[in-house]
């Protein structure tokens, strides 16, 4: 029998060159209230899920991003319609790469953050 679990991705880490600017960008774009936690060996800005007892979904950390557009793509939920999120990406200094792409369960679009990290922003149906 093959291994199955509720969530295969248990943690996402996204390297950024300026933690405070990146935190402001992702807060503005997603609508998330992020906090910077400095209790570990490195500071990190945490995306807190609705059910915090299950852990955190992802964090930003001071690091070296992959060359522009060459790293993996992380897809994030964001508040509002895709078009509104696209406008917030642009206003916050990011780059919108695609139009919304429909899926049976919603839609998403590709973008790049301030460091050129590839990200997708998802809107549920």
Image (tube, rainbow, N blue to C red):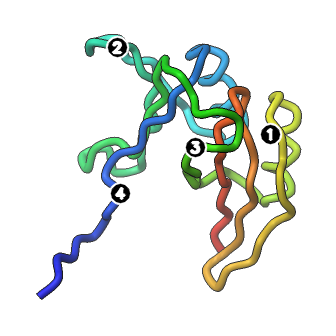
Residue 71 numbered mark, or none: 3
Q: Which residue is mark 4?
A: 9
Rendered view: 124 above or below 39? below
Q: Earlier in the sequence, mark 4 or mark 2?
A: 4
Q: Earlier in the sequence, mark 1 or mark 3?
A: 3
Q: CA distance from mark 4 to mark 3?
A: 16 Å
1 or 4: mark nearer the eye: 4
Q: Which residue is mark 1?
A: 89
Q: Observer-nearest residue: 65 or 120? A: 65
Q: Position of residue 2 (x, y in %)?
A: 17, 83
Q: CA distance from mark 1 to mark 3?
A: 19 Å
Crowding near pointer 1: few (<14 within 10 Å), some, many (20+)? many
Rendered view: 104 above or below 33? below
Q: Observer-nearest residue: 35 or 60? A: 60
Secondary structure of the residue carrying numbered label 1? helix
Q: CA distance from mark 1 to mark 2?
A: 27 Å
Q: CA distance from mark 2 to mark 3?
A: 21 Å
Q: Which residue is mark 2?
A: 42
Q: Earlier in the sequence, mark 4 or mark 3?
A: 4
Crowding near pointer 4: few (<14 within 10 Å), some, many (20+)? few
Crowding near pointer 2: few (<14 within 10 Å), some, many (20+)? few
Secondary structure of the residue carrying numbered label 2? loop
Residue at image coords 35%, 46%: 11
């Amino acid at each position: 029998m093959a291994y199955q679990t509720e969530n295969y991705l248990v943690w996402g880490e996204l390297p950024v060159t300026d933690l405070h600017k990146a935190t402001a960008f992702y807060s503005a774009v997603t609508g998330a209230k992020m906090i910077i936690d400095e209790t570990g060996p490195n500071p990190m800005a945490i995306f807190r899920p609705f059910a915090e007892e299950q852990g955190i979904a992802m964090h930003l950390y001071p690091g070296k991003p992959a060359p522009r557009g060459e790293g993996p793509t992380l897809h994030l939920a964001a508040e509002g319609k895709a078009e509104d999120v696209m406008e917030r990406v642009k206003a916050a200094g990011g780059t919108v790469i695609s139009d919304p792409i429909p899926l049976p369960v919603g839609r998403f679009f590709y973008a790049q953050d301030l460091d050129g990290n590839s990200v997708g922003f998802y809107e549920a149906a």
